[in-house]
Amino acid sequence: MTSLTHSDSDLPRLKYYMFDWDDNILHMPTTIHLEQKTEQGWKTIDVGTAEFAKIRHDTEQYRPLNGDWDQAFSDFYDSGHRGAQSFLEDTQVALQPVIDRPDQAAPSFHRFKKALIEGSLFAIITARAHSALSIRKGVEYFIAHALNDEERLQMIKNLRRFIKLFGEDGTLLTDGEVLARYLDLNRYRGVSSPEFQQIMGRTPSSAESPEEAKQFAVQDFVKHVINMIRARGVEASISMGFSDDDPHNVAAVTDYLNQELARQFPDVKFVVYNTADPANIKQRKVVIRGK
């Protein structure tokens, strides 16, 4: 299940995607609770994710609320005052303005929507601390409300075609079962979550940077996809895209792809999109080919 085109060599070309969520797919209303240094002392402020991406390394002027990062990011956890509904609720709030005004969408909104319609496998790789289930519920809401009836129908048709391509008989599956199987194959990674830290083999107290955790999530998804293709004996040309609006994450993933994954998977083309400046995404696009 992936986007399918044909290359010059007549092999099918399979496309897969990895997306950051905040300010890349949706402009979420969730805020980070910080303290800012002023002439009068430290004052409490709330900042959005786009602003935080710019100031998060400025430890001289900003610090977490009460010196506690868990308090600073309480709305980015399933254990905050809204519990496991926080990601879904904020997705609902963030999506409605885009439905009304598609031109106001975050830089990768339309690419994510296209990936869904095409039936491409994808990974959501966010620095949030939500569980995979919480993030998946947000994706399910996106499918139900960002795609119209015709687009959802085309999505199911593409998914059925890929079931057949990968040598399976999906004729007895309902549309709901086809969609559920597709969603099961994707990855939903809140890299700061206890769930993901356990996958990485870390303890809850481990100080893992978002950049390093995202590198691990990228590796996990790439290996997941490659193993699936190899297990089914599909011959294809493969490309994988990664998009993120945080330059630090972009740099870390680009370095990791260059130094590690391009060597492990020389037949895969990797494409990295820095979406920090939506007007210059093409200029900030980096293509990494196998070593």
Image (tube, grey):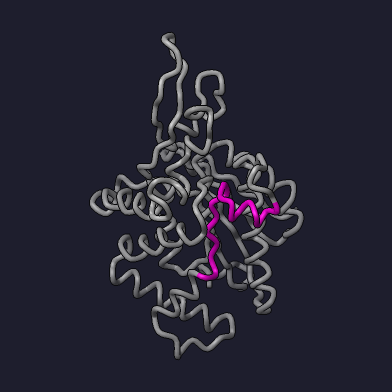
**Residue 186 within the segment the image draws in magenta:** yes
Pick out the residue farthest to the top.
39
The answer to whether residue 12 is seen in the rendering is yes
Q: 266 and 203: which one is in front?
A: 203
**Above or below: residue 230 compared with residue 274:** below
Work out whether 233 lies above or below 115.
Answer: below
Residue 183 vs residue 220: left or right? left
Q: Which residue is at the far left?
A: 100
Above or below: residue 22 compared with residue 85: above
For the question of whether residue 4 can be seen, the reply is no
Q: Which residues are magenta?
A: 184-201
The picture places residue 140, in percent across and down from the top left corner, at 39, 64
Q: Which residue is found at the position 42% from the left and 50% from the top?
A: 25
Q: How far across and down, in percent of the image, does residue 177 sit? A: 44, 80
Q: Residue at x 49, y 72 (%)?
A: 182
How many numbered circles are shown? 0
Q: Residue at x 53, y 84 (%)?
A: 164
Can you give x and y, in whole percent of width and height, for residue 51 in the image? Answer: 43, 31
Nearest to the observer: residue 32 or residue 245: 32
Residue 264: which quarter of the image?
bottom right
Q: Whole-percent x and y of residue 90?
A: 35, 49
> For residue 100: magenta?
no
Which residue occupies 64% across, 57% down?
A: 269
